Amino acid sequence: AHANTGTRTTTAERSVPLASARQFGATNKLLVTDNWASPHTLDRHFSKHGADFNSATANEYATQASNFMQQSIANGVTAKIDSEGVIRIFDRASSTFGSYNPDGRTRTFFKLKNAEYWKRQPGNTPWSY
């Protein structure tokens, strides 16, 4: 819920929950269980894709994925939301792809080797800037 501060909330902000600034604190670290959809898959994803982002640990990789989603939404990076509410984001400039549950927790995060992968992803663009 937003306090009545006179600040407008955009449709994108209402439809995609973002982690509150309070969760990040000064160290910008979240617990893995707060930002990774299936914690039992994190080590496998980190082993496969962590090097794409120079991640030193699985937790750093998970935090980078969460930050990517939040920054992408704030900056209007290309996104799709499917009928189940799964959010997919692709930053063409860096070839970074992330897929997120409707609650914002990461499903996967990696660098695309082929942009055709993005074209095959289901969903519609939820906003335009």
Image (cartoon, helix red, strand yellow):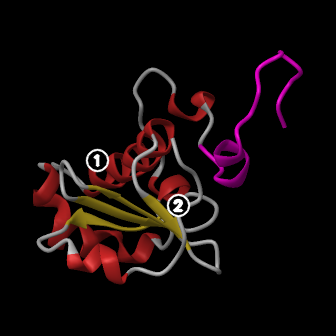
Q: Position of residue 16 (x, y in %)?
A: 64, 53
| Residue occupying the far right of the picture | 4
- Check the image and report above or below for 113 versus 94: below
The N terminus lies in which quarter of the figure?
Answer: top right
Q: Which one is earlier in the sequence, the residue at label 2 or at label 1?
A: 1
Examine the image and state in which quarter residue 126 appears.
bottom right
Q: Where does label 1 land, which residue?
A: 60
x 11%, y 71%: residue: 113
Examine the image and state in which quarter residue 107 appears.
bottom left
The residue lying toward the viewer, choosing from 37 and 92, is 92
Left or right of residue 80, residue 48 in this image: left
x 45%, y 59%: residue: 79
What is the count of numbered marks?
Answer: 2
Amino acid at circle 2: Arg
Label 1 neighbour load within 10 Å: few <14, some 14-19, many 20+? some
Q: Position of residue 8 (x, y in %)?
A: 76, 27
Q: Which mark is residue 105?
A: 2
Q: Secondary structure at mark 2?
A: loop
The residue lying toward the viewer, choosing from 9 and 1, is 9
Left or right of residue 6, residue 82 in this image: left
Q: Position of residue 55 (x, y in %)?
A: 17, 50
In the rendered structure, which segment of residues is drawn in magenta? Answer: 1-18
- Check the image and report above or below for 64 versus 115: above
